[in-house]
Image (spheres, coloured by chain):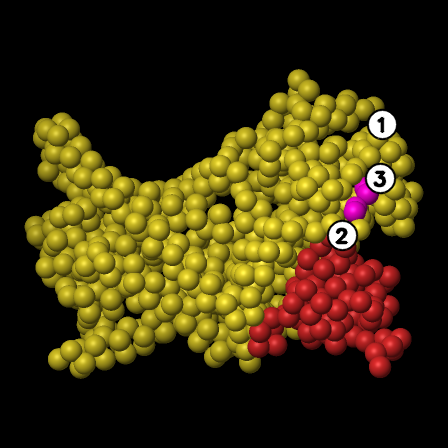
């Protein structure tokens, strides 16, 4: 059963979404993520994942972003139910 | 003169707004403390001449690397009377933080919500007056792309510049904490629950398709090169014919009175050299236009998405691939584009591979040789193969050097919705690229062709272009190194000048053979075969980048050993690749 356990963003599959709980990043990366809209409390949806372990295509608010799974690890989310 | 700075995040249409406010009259200039050139222009606003400066797109004014450092240094070292903060109206909520940061720098402000047309399509409603009142900053809703709201912005700028107390609005904004900024935006900018770019989603389902995405990408690139050739070649032939006709009809009779040396320098040197180069300008313009369209539509960031998995195996990332593609226009801006990378290892590795990108100057050399030695139907295929070699050498280089330049930069990029540039945007962009190319090219080419003419016509008594001239002697000296590649002494001279700028290579050949256009092609086709021509093209593609590229590498990397590596490695690689191809082809077709 998928319940209230927090996940990292890269654990979500295409079409799944969640709410950001925490960002584990240094100050510089934290600012960059925040400027791109990735902040605590925001809703994120995975649109697609690139082939051959390619980057994630995600949507937060009205902004589409791509980020590598390795970097998505630092973002903790609460999985939403469809 | 009062100075206005444009500040905004990447992908907010800041440069489009800059063009809209200034027309096409912007000039690049140098600024205290900054190593990069910034676009600036003088414009008449509210009966007063003011200077408008376009600063690079930044995410956060508190960061210390790359473009962020450029903006902070600019603001610290140059007096700015007014800052126009440009946001994408649809993304105002996340971008508004930048307004607070600029306000803290103590600047008088105007807030521009750009791309109003896109916001309207998404069903977003914006209450400009309430937002302006909440923030205590003048707010303007515009579409720089279509020109809506620009007059209102003019009025706001004029009013702001007339204001007495320079920190009046800034002090009010000083109290603008991030939470308050976001709350103000949420109150005035109403976004429907499911706002999304429906057309973009549809297109992405095809272009970013898990299996079809990459094949479609390569097919599109191939079609683009075919189209440039199909449209550009007839125009180029017409140009070459017209230039030759002008010489026969007007210049030859007009200059008969001059001494032989003077008319030789003017006609065989300058006119033939410049004319041969000029006939390629239409092709270059077409190529730039196509690349500008690919970039402006947002497809380049999709290319980064598609290529990232592959690039990461070579120690690079999706952005490196985009920079390599940008380098197909000109290596210099692509090298400067690496500033967005914060990891020095990734940045240096990308800067090492960018000069292997087949730039427009090299394109011109290849178009000439392909037209001279290959049938028209396989010409585009030959050119496409050179683009593949260009990418392959870049991959090989990064594979070899990745252990020395480690990438620890996170890969997080915006994927903008597809945008279709207007005719005006395309023309402005094309004009900007071409004038930049010509400015850079003419400077080198005039000096280059004159020098080539001198070296190929002296010492006195030597038959022009023969092996007795200074140039012939240099070519002869290098012959033992280059003859195993099928490159003869005359082509060697052209290569030497190509080190200054690849734009000079064809001009130099025109001077060396004292012929131009079609006649030059026929002569060269009579002296070398296609294997030699392809070997020469491979060498030209890979060997030492031009002087402007080296100068850019030097100023961006700030390292002598790295610059030396960027000069020596491609030279060695070029020799090896041409050697393997030439000797292999000779054995195979013996």
Q: Which residue is nearer to you in this view: B202 or B7?
A: B202
Which residues are drawn in magenta?
A: B188-192
Q: Which residue is nearer to you in this view: B212 or B307?
A: B212
The hue used for chain A is red
Label 2: which secondary element: loop
Marks 3 & 2 on one chain? yes
Determine the residue located farthest toward the top in the rendered image: B47
Q: Residues within 10 Å of mark 1 (few under 14, many from 20)?
A: few
* Pointers 2 and 1 in contact (C-beta within 8 Å): no
The hue used for chain B is yellow
Residue at position x 42%, y 42% from top? B434
Q: Which residue is mark 3?
A: B188
Label 3: which secondary element: helix
Residue B565 in percent (x, y) is at: 46, 71
Q: Residues within 10 Å of mark 2 (few under 14, many from 20)?
A: few
Residue B451 sits inside the magenta stretch: no
Q: CA distance from mark 3 to mark 1?
A: 28 Å
Which of the 4 quarters of the picture holds residue B482?
Answer: bottom left
Which chain contains the residue that carries disc 3?
B
Q: Is residue B119 above or below residue B348?
A: above
């Amino acid at each position: 059963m998928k319940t209230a356990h927090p996940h990292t963003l890269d654990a979500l599959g295409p079409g799944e979404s969640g709410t950001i709980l925490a960002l584990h990043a240094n100050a510089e990366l934290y600012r960059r993520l925040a400027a791109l809209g990735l902040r605590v409390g925001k809703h994120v949806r995975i649109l697609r994942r690139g082939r051959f372990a390619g980057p994630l295509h995600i949507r937060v608010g009205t902004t589409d972003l791509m980020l590598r799974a390795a970097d998505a690890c630092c973002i903790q989310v609460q999985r939403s139910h469809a | 003169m009062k100075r206005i700075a444009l500040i905004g995040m990447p992908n907010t249409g800041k440069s489009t707004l800059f063009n809209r406010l200034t027309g096409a009259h912007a000039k690049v200039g140098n600024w205290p403390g900054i190593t990069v050139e910034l676009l600036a222009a003088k414009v008449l606003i509210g009966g007063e001449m003011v200077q408008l400066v376009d600063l690079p797109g930044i995410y956060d004014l508190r960061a210390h690397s790359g473009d962020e450092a450029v903006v902070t240094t600019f603001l610290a070292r140059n007096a700015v009377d007014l800052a126009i903060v440009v946001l994408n109206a649809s993304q105002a909520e996340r971008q508004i933080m930048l307004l607070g940061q600029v306000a803290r720098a103590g600047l008088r402000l105007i807030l521009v919500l750009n791309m109003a047309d896109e916001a309207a399509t998404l069903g977003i409603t914006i209450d400009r007056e309430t937002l302006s009142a909440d923030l205590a900053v003048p707010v303007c809703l515009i579409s720089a792309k279509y020109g809506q709201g620009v007059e209102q912005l003019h009025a706001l700028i004029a009013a702001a510049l007339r204001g007495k107390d320079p920190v009046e609005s800034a002090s009010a904004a000083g109290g603008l904490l991030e939470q308050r900024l976001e709350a103000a935006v949420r109150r005035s900018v109403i976004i429907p629950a499911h706002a999304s770019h429906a057309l973009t989603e549809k297109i992405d389902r095809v272009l970013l398709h898990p299996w079809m995405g990459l094949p479609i990408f390569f097919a599109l690139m191939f079609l683009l090169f075919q189209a440039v050739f199909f449209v550009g070649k007839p125009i180029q032939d017409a140009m070459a014919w017209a230039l030759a006709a002008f010489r026969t009809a007007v210049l030859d009779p007009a200059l008969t009175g001059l001494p032989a040396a003077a008319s030789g320098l003017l006609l065989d040197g300058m006119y033939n050299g410049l004319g041969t180069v000029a006939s390629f300008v239409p092709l270059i313009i077409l190529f730039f236009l196509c690349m500008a369209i690919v970039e402006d539509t947002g497809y380049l960031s999709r290319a980064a998405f598609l290529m990232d998995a592959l690039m990461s195996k070579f120690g690079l990332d999706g952005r490196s691939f985009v920079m390599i593609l940008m380098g197909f226009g000109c290596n210099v801006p692509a090298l400067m584009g690496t500033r967005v990378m914060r990891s020095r290892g990734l940045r240096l590795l990308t800067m090492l591979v960018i000069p292997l990108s087949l730039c427009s100057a090299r394109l011109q050399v290849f178009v000439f040789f392909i037209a001279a030695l290959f049938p028209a139907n396989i010409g585009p295929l030959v050119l496409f193969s050179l683009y593949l070699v260009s990418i392959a050498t870049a991959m090989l280089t990064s594979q070899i050097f990745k252990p020395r330049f480690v990438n620890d930069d996170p890969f997080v990029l915006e994927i903008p919705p597809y945008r279709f540039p207007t005719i005006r945007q395309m023309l402005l962009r094309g004009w900007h690229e071409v004038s930049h190319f010509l400015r850079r090219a003419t400077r080198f080419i005039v000096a280059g062709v004159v020098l080539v003419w001198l070296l190929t016509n002296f010492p006195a008594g030597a038959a022009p272009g023969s092996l007795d001239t200074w140039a012939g002697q240099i070519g002869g000296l290098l012959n033992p190194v280059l003859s195993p590649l099928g490159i003869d002494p005359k082509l060697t001279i052209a290569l030497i000048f190509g080190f200054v700028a690849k734009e000079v290579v064809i001009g130099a050949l025109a001077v060396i053979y004292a012929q131009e256009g079609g006649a030059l092609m026929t002569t060269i086709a009579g002296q070398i075969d296609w294997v030699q021509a392809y070997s020469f093209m491979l060498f030209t593609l890979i060997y030492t980048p031009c002087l402007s590229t080296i100068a850019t590498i030097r100023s961006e990397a700030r390292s002598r050993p790295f610059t030396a590596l960027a000069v020596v490695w491609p030279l060695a690689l070029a020799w090896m690749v041409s050697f393997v191809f030439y000797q292999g082809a000779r054995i195979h077709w013996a």
